[in-house]
Amino acid sequence: MIARSDNSDFSSELARFDFLKTMKKYKVNVIGRNTFKIASKSNGFPLDGLNIVVTKHKIKLKREWKNVIVTDKKPKDIIKIIESKGYKSAMVAGGKLATSFLKEGLVNEIYLNVEPIAFGKGIPIFTNENFETKLELLQVKRFSKNEVRLRYRVLN
Protein backbone atom coordinates (compact mmCIF):
# COMPACT_ATOMS: atom_id res chain seq x y z
CA MET A 1 0.00 0.00 0.00
CA ILE A 2 1.17 3.54 -0.65
CA ALA A 3 -1.36 5.18 1.67
CA ARG A 4 -4.29 4.40 3.90
CA SER A 5 -7.81 4.47 2.41
CA ASP A 6 -8.23 8.05 3.64
CA ASN A 7 -4.97 9.04 1.85
CA SER A 8 -3.16 9.55 5.15
CA ASP A 9 0.54 8.84 4.94
CA PHE A 10 2.24 6.34 7.20
CA SER A 11 5.82 6.98 6.09
CA SER A 12 8.42 8.15 8.56
CA GLU A 13 9.85 11.64 8.37
CA LEU A 14 13.17 10.23 7.13
CA ALA A 15 11.47 8.32 4.32
CA ARG A 16 9.38 11.35 3.27
CA PHE A 17 12.48 13.56 3.26
CA ASP A 18 14.37 11.06 1.09
CA PHE A 19 11.40 10.73 -1.28
CA LEU A 20 11.34 14.52 -1.73
CA LYS A 21 15.11 14.52 -2.30
CA THR A 22 14.66 11.87 -5.00
CA MET A 23 11.87 13.87 -6.66
CA LYS A 24 14.10 16.96 -6.75
CA LYS A 25 16.86 14.95 -8.42
CA TYR A 26 14.67 14.10 -11.41
CA LYS A 27 13.64 17.71 -12.24
CA VAL A 28 10.38 16.39 -13.76
CA ASN A 29 7.65 14.99 -11.56
CA VAL A 30 4.46 13.43 -12.85
CA ILE A 31 1.79 13.11 -10.19
CA GLY A 32 -1.91 12.31 -10.02
CA ARG A 33 -4.73 14.40 -8.58
CA ASN A 34 -4.57 12.91 -5.07
CA THR A 35 -0.80 13.41 -4.81
CA PHE A 36 -1.28 16.96 -6.12
CA LYS A 37 -3.91 17.71 -3.44
CA ILE A 38 -1.48 16.66 -0.73
CA ALA A 39 1.65 18.23 -2.27
CA SER A 40 0.01 21.57 -3.10
CA LYS A 41 -0.62 22.19 0.59
CA SER A 42 3.10 22.13 1.35
CA ASN A 43 5.54 25.01 1.01
CA GLY A 44 7.77 22.85 -1.19
CA PHE A 45 5.32 22.66 -4.10
CA PRO A 46 5.91 23.03 -6.94
CA LEU A 47 9.41 21.65 -7.18
CA ASP A 48 12.01 23.29 -9.42
CA GLY A 49 11.85 21.92 -12.93
CA LEU A 50 8.65 20.64 -14.49
CA ASN A 51 5.62 19.41 -12.55
CA ILE A 52 2.91 17.56 -14.46
CA VAL A 53 -0.43 16.82 -12.81
CA VAL A 54 -2.41 14.11 -14.57
CA THR A 55 -6.15 14.36 -13.98
CA LYS A 56 -9.45 14.67 -15.79
CA HIS A 57 -10.67 17.08 -13.10
CA LYS A 58 -10.33 20.86 -13.18
CA ILE A 59 -7.56 22.14 -10.94
CA LYS A 60 -7.06 25.75 -9.98
CA LEU A 61 -3.38 26.65 -10.20
CA LYS A 62 -1.77 29.58 -8.47
CA ARG A 63 -0.49 32.24 -10.85
CA GLU A 64 3.11 31.82 -9.66
CA TRP A 65 3.10 28.10 -10.50
CA LYS A 66 4.55 28.65 -13.97
CA ASN A 67 6.21 25.22 -14.05
CA VAL A 68 3.03 23.20 -13.47
CA ILE A 69 1.14 21.58 -16.35
CA VAL A 70 -2.25 19.94 -15.88
CA THR A 71 -3.17 17.33 -18.47
CA ASP A 72 -5.37 14.30 -19.01
CA LYS A 73 -3.10 12.84 -21.70
CA LYS A 74 -1.96 9.21 -21.86
CA PRO A 75 1.55 8.19 -20.67
CA LYS A 76 3.19 8.19 -24.14
CA ASP A 77 1.84 11.70 -24.81
CA ILE A 78 3.11 12.88 -21.42
CA ILE A 79 6.57 11.58 -22.38
CA LYS A 80 6.35 13.71 -25.55
CA ILE A 81 5.54 16.79 -23.41
CA ILE A 82 8.55 16.05 -21.19
CA GLU A 83 10.88 15.57 -24.15
CA SER A 84 9.57 18.73 -25.89
CA LYS A 85 10.65 20.70 -22.80
CA GLY A 86 14.19 19.29 -23.10
CA TYR A 87 14.08 16.74 -20.27
CA LYS A 88 15.29 13.15 -20.58
CA SER A 89 13.79 11.50 -17.47
CA ALA A 90 11.00 11.92 -14.94
CA MET A 91 9.72 10.51 -11.69
CA VAL A 92 6.15 9.21 -11.67
CA ALA A 93 4.44 9.03 -8.27
CA GLY A 94 1.11 7.44 -7.41
CA GLY A 95 -0.36 3.95 -7.70
CA LYS A 96 -2.79 4.30 -10.60
CA LEU A 97 -0.51 6.63 -12.51
CA ALA A 98 2.59 4.47 -11.98
CA THR A 99 0.63 1.42 -13.17
CA SER A 100 -0.36 3.16 -16.41
CA PHE A 101 3.27 4.07 -17.18
CA LEU A 102 4.50 0.59 -16.22
CA LYS A 103 1.95 -1.14 -18.46
CA GLU A 104 3.13 1.01 -21.39
CA GLY A 105 6.77 -0.03 -20.83
CA LEU A 106 7.77 3.51 -19.84
CA VAL A 107 9.33 2.74 -16.43
CA ASN A 108 12.97 1.74 -15.98
CA GLU A 109 13.27 1.89 -12.18
CA ILE A 110 10.96 1.43 -9.20
CA TYR A 111 11.54 2.71 -5.67
CA LEU A 112 9.66 0.93 -2.86
CA ASN A 113 9.73 2.02 0.76
CA VAL A 114 9.17 -0.72 3.32
CA GLU A 115 7.80 0.65 6.60
CA PRO A 116 7.27 -1.22 9.89
CA ILE A 117 3.47 -1.14 9.67
CA ALA A 118 0.94 -3.56 8.21
CA PHE A 119 -2.69 -2.86 7.25
CA GLY A 120 -5.16 -4.51 4.93
CA LYS A 121 -7.08 -1.64 3.40
CA GLY A 122 -5.57 1.26 1.53
CA ILE A 123 -4.33 2.58 -1.78
CA PRO A 124 -2.33 -0.14 -3.54
CA ILE A 125 1.06 0.59 -5.04
CA PHE A 126 -0.23 -0.78 -8.35
CA THR A 127 -3.88 -0.82 -9.38
CA ASN A 128 -5.65 -4.08 -10.06
CA GLU A 129 -4.55 -4.40 -13.67
CA ASN A 130 -3.50 -7.41 -15.70
CA PHE A 131 0.28 -7.09 -16.02
CA GLU A 132 3.47 -8.65 -14.77
CA THR A 133 6.93 -7.10 -14.67
CA LYS A 134 10.21 -8.69 -13.66
CA LEU A 135 12.55 -6.65 -11.49
CA GLU A 136 16.23 -6.70 -10.50
CA LEU A 137 17.27 -5.35 -7.10
CA LEU A 138 19.79 -2.51 -7.51
CA GLN A 139 20.01 -1.02 -4.02
CA VAL A 140 18.80 -1.32 -0.45
CA LYS A 141 18.91 1.96 1.45
CA ARG A 142 18.32 1.79 5.20
CA PHE A 143 16.53 4.73 6.85
CA SER A 144 16.44 3.19 10.33
CA LYS A 145 16.57 -0.19 12.03
CA ASN A 146 13.10 -1.04 10.65
CA GLU A 147 12.67 0.89 7.39
CA VAL A 148 14.31 0.54 4.01
CA ARG A 149 13.99 1.73 0.44
CA LEU A 150 14.37 -0.88 -2.26
CA ARG A 151 15.43 0.30 -5.71
CA TYR A 152 14.70 -2.03 -8.63
CA ARG A 153 15.48 -2.03 -12.34
CA VAL A 154 12.55 -2.99 -14.58
CA LEU A 155 13.68 -5.88 -16.78
CA ASN A 156 10.86 -6.21 -19.29
Image (cartoon, helix red, strand yellow):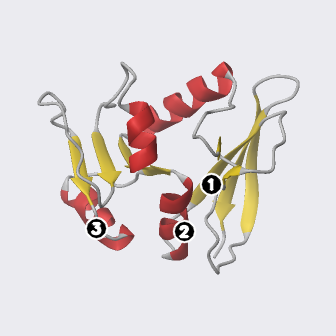
Does dot 2 land on a helix, a strand or a loop?
helix
Question: Dot 2: few (<14), some (14–19), or many (≥20) neighbours within 10 Å?
Answer: many
Towards the viewer: 134 or 39: 39
Which badge, 2 or 3, is on the more N-terminal residue? Answer: 3
Q: Amino acid at mark 3?
A: Lys
Query: From this viewpoint, which residue is outermost toward the right?
Result: 145
Mark whose residue sits in front, 2 or 3? 3
Q: Residue at x 22, y 48 (%)?
A: 69
Question: Dot 1: few (<14), some (14–19), or many (≥20) neighbours within 10 Å?
Answer: some
Mark whose residue sits in front, 1 or 3? 3
Q: Position of residue 137 (x, y in %)?
A: 76, 55
Marker disc for residue 102: 2
Query: In the displayed structure, does residue 50 sit left or right of residue 108?
Result: left
Q: Amino acid at mark 1?
A: Ile
Q: Are marks 2 and 1 in contact (CB under 8 Å)?
A: yes
The residue carrying mark 3 is 73
Q: Position of residue 77 (x, y in %)?
A: 28, 70
Query: From this viewpoint, which residue is outermost toward the bottom?
Result: 130
The residue carrying mark 1 is 110
In the figure, 78 relative to 44: above or below? Answer: below
Q: Position of residue 6 (x, y in %)?
A: 59, 41
Q: CA distance from mark 1 to mark 3?
A: 22 Å
In the figure, 59 relative to 38: above or below? Answer: below
Question: Dot 3: few (<14), some (14–19), or many (≥20) neighbours within 10 Å?
Answer: few
Q: CA distance from mark 2 to mark 1?
A: 10 Å
Looking at the rendered image, the quarter that the C terminus falls into is bottom right
Does dot 3 land on a helix, a strand or a loop?
loop
Q: Amino acid at mark 2?
A: Leu
Which badge, 2 or 1, is on the more N-terminal residue? Answer: 2
Q: Residue at x 20, y 38 (%)?
A: 67
Q: Position of residue 149 (x, y in %)?
A: 72, 39
